[in-house]
Amino acid sequence: MEALGIAKEFEKEGARRQAAEDSGKPGLFGSLQADTLWSKDEQRHLRAGHHWLFEFGDAGDGSCIEKTFELAPRKSEEYKGFLFYNGDSAIVVKRWFHRVDDDASGRTFVEYNPDTMGKKGAPPVELLFNSCKLRGVFSAEKFKALVPPALEGAGRTRTRGAAVRELQGVSEVRHLLAQETDDDVRHVCVQAGATTPSK
């Protein structure tokens, strides 16, 4: 009986993951279950359901899926440094986001810049991950760009998106994740059996 319950949970998790994977596409944002710390700076934000944010990239065909793996049961394949099992997909990332230190809620992010945020001599950050870690997909409505004051004037004379792209160096563009989206993603991470990453 217990084995049947475990099988049903696996089936539910697979269906949930497939639904999230199917809804992901370039231009949307997503959450990835975090099993380790990206950096020591993350420690202040650690709590149940810890996750990372990213923007879906384009795999070259208009989708975010670079490769889907069709393997025999219990077989795995290593691809670009990641381990994949049957049904997993390699998801392309356009850019990662990093939580800012001055927001205790952990919902304010900036685009990750390896030149200023990465460790000297560290390997480049991968722009790929295994779909089995995908925990949420959402639009810019749920992950709003907070336009710095230096960009406000430019935003009045042309589209705000163009102004942000043109004047990005003027000030750090922050993004705020909606509270309900953060709560939903954390809940899914916990339901998937995520543990809080060790410090």
Image: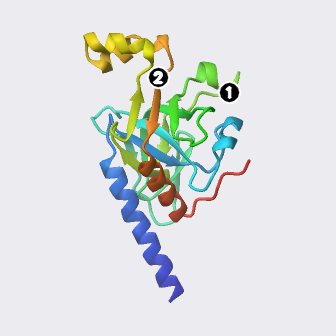
Q: Residue flagged by tag 2: what amino acid is it?
A: Val
Q: Helix, strand or loop at disc 2?
A: loop
Q: Identify which residue is drawn at 47% across, 54% down.
A: 183
Visible residue check, residue 27? yes
Q: Residues within 10 Å of mark 1 (few under 14, many from 20)?
A: few
Along the viewing direction, whichever of 104 and 159 lies nearer the viewer: 104
Reply above or below: 173 against 57: above
Along the viewing direction, whichever of 43 and 151 lies nearer the viewer: 151
Q: Helix, strand or loop at disc 1?
A: loop
Q: Of the residues tagged 1 and 2, which is closer to the observer? A: 2
Q: Identify which residue is drawn at 38% across, 47% down.
A: 137
Image position of 33 (left or right of 40): left
- Disc with the residue nearer the chain's start (1 vs 2): 1
Q: Residue flagged by tag 1: what amino acid is it?
A: Ala
Q: Identify which residue is drawn at 45% across, 36% down.
A: 176
Residue 132: x and y in percent read 47, 54
Reply above or below: 152 against 68: above
Q: What residue is pinned by disc 2?
A: 173
Q: Residues within 10 Å of mark 2 (few under 14, many from 20)?
A: some
Q: What residue is pinned by disc 1?
A: 122
Q: CA distance from mark 1 to mark 2?
A: 25 Å
